[in-house]
Image (cartoon, rainbow, N blue to C red):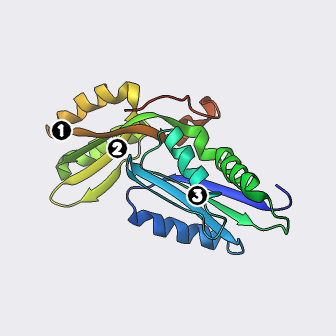
Amino acid sequence: MSRSRFIAAARHLQDAGSLDAWLDERRQAWPRARHYVWAYRLEPGQERATDDHEPAGTAGAPLLELLRERDLVFSGLVVVRYFGGIKLGRGGLARAHREAALATAPLAEWRPACLLSLVVPYAAYPDLERRLAAAGLSPETEFGSGVALRLWVLEDEAGAWETRLTALDPACRMLARGWHAFPALAEALPPTPPQGDRT
C-alpha cells in the first residue's frame, strides 16, 4: 500500500441516523487518520458514499460497489487512511480501499438472510428473548405499548421462524432479504459470500 495504512470496519446500520454515531466511534478509535471514507446501503435505492477528500470516485464508490455486489442491505463500511507520503494514483486508491474492506473480519460472517418484524406483549417477551438467545439471534428492540422487534434470521430458516413468530404476532412480516452478519457462525464460513441476486 506504499506506506499508507488502510483500516476497515463493517457493521449493521438500522437507519441513516445510526451512521453518525458509528463514524464518531471510528474517529475516536482512529484519531490520527487523514481520511474517513464510508458507504452504506439501507435498501436498494437508499445508499450513500463519501470520498472524504480523496479524489472523486476512488474511495467511497468502491465501497458502495462492494455493498451492491454482495447485495448487503442495512449495512455500512468505513475505511480510514493513514497517509504514508506516497501517492497511489486513482487506480491504486480504489484497489486499496476495496481490498481493505474485503479484509475486514465481519465480511466473513455475511449469510443470506431475511429481516422479520413483529410486536409482542411484554408478558411474552422474556420467553421469546430466551429462545432467540439460545438460537444465537440478537433482535433490535423498541419498547412502547408492546415490544417491537426487528430480527435477522438465516434465509433457509426464515419460513420456520415466521411461522413461530406469527403465533405471537399475526402481523409478523418480512421486511427485506439480503446478507447479514451472524458472528456466532463466523468460524464455519468461507471468507467471502457467494454472488447472486437476493431479490
Name which residue lies at 34% across and 38% down.
131
Lower sequence index among marks 1 and 3: 3
Which amino acid type corresponds to the residue marked 2 in the rendered image? Leu
Q: Nearer the viewer, mark 2 or mark 3?
A: 3
Q: What is the C-alpha distance between the residues marked 2 and 3?
A: 28 Å
> On the image, numbered disc 1 is attached to which residue?
168
- Residue 4 lies, in percent from the top left, at 80, 62
- Residue 110 lies, in percent from the top left, at 53, 38
Q: Tag count in the figure?
A: 3
Q: Is residue 28 above or below residue 2?
A: below
Which amino acid type corresponds to the residue marked 1 in the rendered image? Leu
Lower sequence index among marks 2 and 3: 3
Name which residue lies at 22% across and 44% down.
118
Say if mark 1 contacts mark 3, CB within 8 Å: no
- Say which element carries label 2: strand
Say the numbered circle drawn on residue 18.
Answer: none
